[in-house]
Amino acid sequence: MARAKTQFICQNCGTAHSRWVGKCDGCGAWNTLVEEDPMGGIGSGPGKAAKKGRPVALTSLSGEIEEAPRIPTGINELDRATGGGFVRGSAVLIGGDPGIGKSTLLMQAAAALSRRGQRVIYVSGEEAVAQVRLRAQRLDAAETDVLLAAETNVEDIIATLSEGKRPDLVIIDSIQTLWSDTADSAPGTVTQLRTGVQAMIRFAKQTGTTMVLVGHVTKEGQIAGPRLVEHMVDAVLYFEGDRGHHYRILRTVKNRFGPTDEIGVFEMSDKGLREVANPSELFLGERNAASPGAAVFAGMEGTRPVLVEVQALVAPTSLGTARRAVVGWDSSRLAMILAVLEAHCGVRLGQHDVYLNVAGGYRIAEPAADMAIAAALVSSLAGVALPADCVYFGEVSLSGAARPVAHTAQRLKEAEKLGFASAVLPSSSPDLPKGGRGLSQMESLPDLVALIAGSKLRQGQQEAAE
């Protein structure tokens, strides 16, 4: 009798190895290989003779859609992140740190959809029915018609969902707890994860049910398991937030049916998550406009303008090597701005410690924050406060030139709505409003440094006159 072949699968990246080794050849992680049966699971490789396929029906692109393509939840921030609501027959993966509020958000969404007459099923693999009911009572969702089950077997879940009327929304919390009889491996392994997700996606595509899957994240903030899971689903949402702050951000990183750069902002309370219609007021709520080193950045998150305060502290160092600490921004981008300031503007920061923070725990990803960061750094070094009614945005090149960014009109409109009367931006910015009152257009970064230095000189003259 031939010996049964086994293979060792990396639980971090999914690379298959013929024998056990300490270090994965695919991702370089140590001690992540687990022995699994290659014959078990869907898509696990050729082990049995392939059966003859059956022809499927072909159709044309044109035709009527029997039902509405999307299911709006009524939670505006969630609908914004998903592109207008859940698409029927789609699979959505939601990830986030433990305790960040994933289950709370989905329970509120399930209750909202149930109140709109949708059939919603919530399948929990981590909590008992009584525990889920306690959360529902706290969120005022216990009186809705949401159907609840505590099960982890894939075949049993599919059989349950196939009975009776087709569900409009199914929530699986979480995919790491699913296991199938067809895969000979422990729950949470690559084979079980792939098998369970494929079964759920197949059911969603065949029936038109929206499938929402909850996934754990690693220490690096990525969905636990192989990246293959993210490629299989139609949309991937990350629920972000800091335990030290009361707000949460639902960020879209993949969406086949909508934009991939939208965010939804929520505030955590004792009654669950509350929508934040104007995030700019949240991030500017505790602003001290009279302190040096603080600049307001007019940013964009998808189609939504967001104003956030950037704080910088520049202090002489007592060490041989100056320290650079960044929270909420890219440290490599900060090193570039410091180099441009020293090379083209004559601002010497080599013997100073630099601390940079984005207020409220917010994270900035777009290069349009270069001007605001540079203004905050120069303001802290010079010890002069920037104008309280001014916003900053624009990209800085390695030559020191100020480069324009997109959505200029939306940034300025949001700033005007919140009471900001002036703005510092690149000179060649498109879509400038007519009149352009209060706009300081900069051609290069030295112009910005000269503007701040001039304000310091005027401030000193006023103090001398008094």
Image: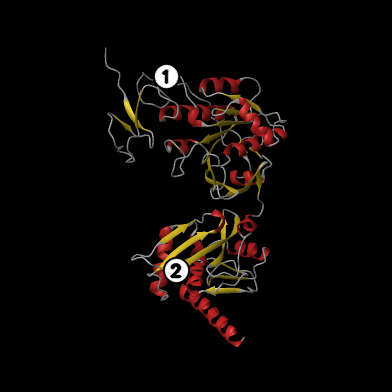
Identified by mark 2, the residue type is: Ala
Image coords of residue 311 (percent x, y): 52, 63
Image coords of residue 238 (percent x, y): 53, 43
For the residue pair 429 and 417, the one nearer the viewer reads as 417
Q: Is residue 138 above or below residue 399?
A: above
Residue at x-position 55% and y-position 47%: 243
Image coords of residue 315 (percent x, y): 44, 68
Identified by mark 1, the residue type is: Lys
Image coords of residue 156 (percent x, y): 54, 20
Between label 1 and label 2, give the one nearer the viewer: 2
Quarter that holds the C terminus: bottom right
- Seen from this angle, which residue lies furthest top? 1
Disc 2 crowd rating (10 Å Cα; few below 14, some 14-19, many 20+) is some
Q: Could you tell me if residue 174 is visible in this image?
A: yes
For the residue pair 180 and 163, the one nearer the viewer reads as 180
Residue at x-position 55% and y-position 31%: 173
Residue highlighted by disc 2: 315
- What element does badge 2 sit on? strand
- What element does badge 1 sit on? loop
Which image quadrant for residue 162? top right
Q: Is residue 426 above or below residue 153?
A: below
Which image quadrant for residue 335? bottom left
Disc 1 crowd rating (10 Å Cα; few below 14, some 14-19, many 20+) is few
Mark sitting earlier along the chain (1/2): 1
Image side of residue 7 versus residue 247, left or right = left
For the residue pair 17 and 276, the one nearer the viewer reads as 276
Residue highlighted by disc 1: 52
